[in-house]
Image (cartoon, helix red, strand yellow):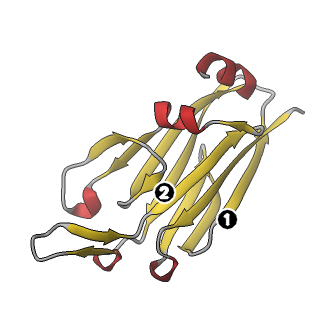
Amino acid sequence: MSTSTFSCEVGTTNPALSLGMEIWFDNQCFFNQEHVQESQTIKYEFNDDVEGSHELRFVLKNKLSEHTAVDSDGKIISDTTLTISNISFDEVDCQYLTTKLAEYHHNFNGTGAETQQKFYGSMGCNGTVSLKFTTPVYIWLLENL
């Protein structure tokens, strides 16, 4: 059996006000932490033998109003966010691919309409970043890099 490895680093901009996070590979949650406080490397090994479509999902949860400071004009002064960096498959840097292909779905923590945006490495609203890819991974990388 041939395997590939996905890895990334997750962290927060304010460890004192931690946020929750899940990471899913298709329908399997392989990372679930209620309080992300320190930067940490996450790795997940998966079967790369069979051609197929897959999805990685990063879920930000537990974001509350106290995670965001606003001034008297309603402008954001500071905001606690989750950061996802050093995204790679089989040690190939995929940060560019993530920016190009990943979609961030959220509704501004219930204060706005459902929206879909590009993902640039930071999650500030409860929601999901979706990255779709195919296996074998090396072919997907060749087609998209």
| Nearer to us: label 2 or label 1 | 1
Q: Is residue 38 left or right of residue 102?
A: right
| Residue sitting at the far bottom | 16
Q: Count neighbours of disc 1 (C-alpha within 10 A) and say few if under 14, some if 14 to 19, many if 20 or more.
A: few
Along the line of sight, the residue nearer the viewer: 23 or 51: 23
Q: Is residue 29 left or right of residue 59?
A: right
> Which residue shows up at 78% across the image and 31% down it?
48
Q: Is residue 52 left or right of residue 130?
A: right
> Which residue shows up at 9% across the image and 71% down it?
73
Residue annotated with mark 2: 59
Mark number displayed over residue 40: 1
| Residue 88 on image: x %, y % | 68, 41
| Residue sitting at the far right | 1
Q: Earlier in the sequence, mark 2 or mark 1?
A: 1
| Residue 15 on image: x %, y % | 52, 77
Mark number displayed over residue 84: none
| Residue 31 on image: x %, y % | 64, 61
Q: Amino acid at mark 1?
A: Gln
Pointers 2 and 1 in contact (C-beta within 8 Å): no
> Which residue shows up at 48% across the image and 36% down it?
99
Query: Which image quarter: residue 87?
Result: top right
Q: Secondary structure at mark 1?
A: strand
Q: Secondary structure at mark 2?
A: strand
Could you give the CA–CA distance between mark 2 and mark 1, rounded to whole angstroms?
Answer: 16 Å
| Residue sitting at the far left | 73
Along the line of sight, the residue nearer the viewer: 141 or 2: 141
For the C terminus, the image quarter is top right
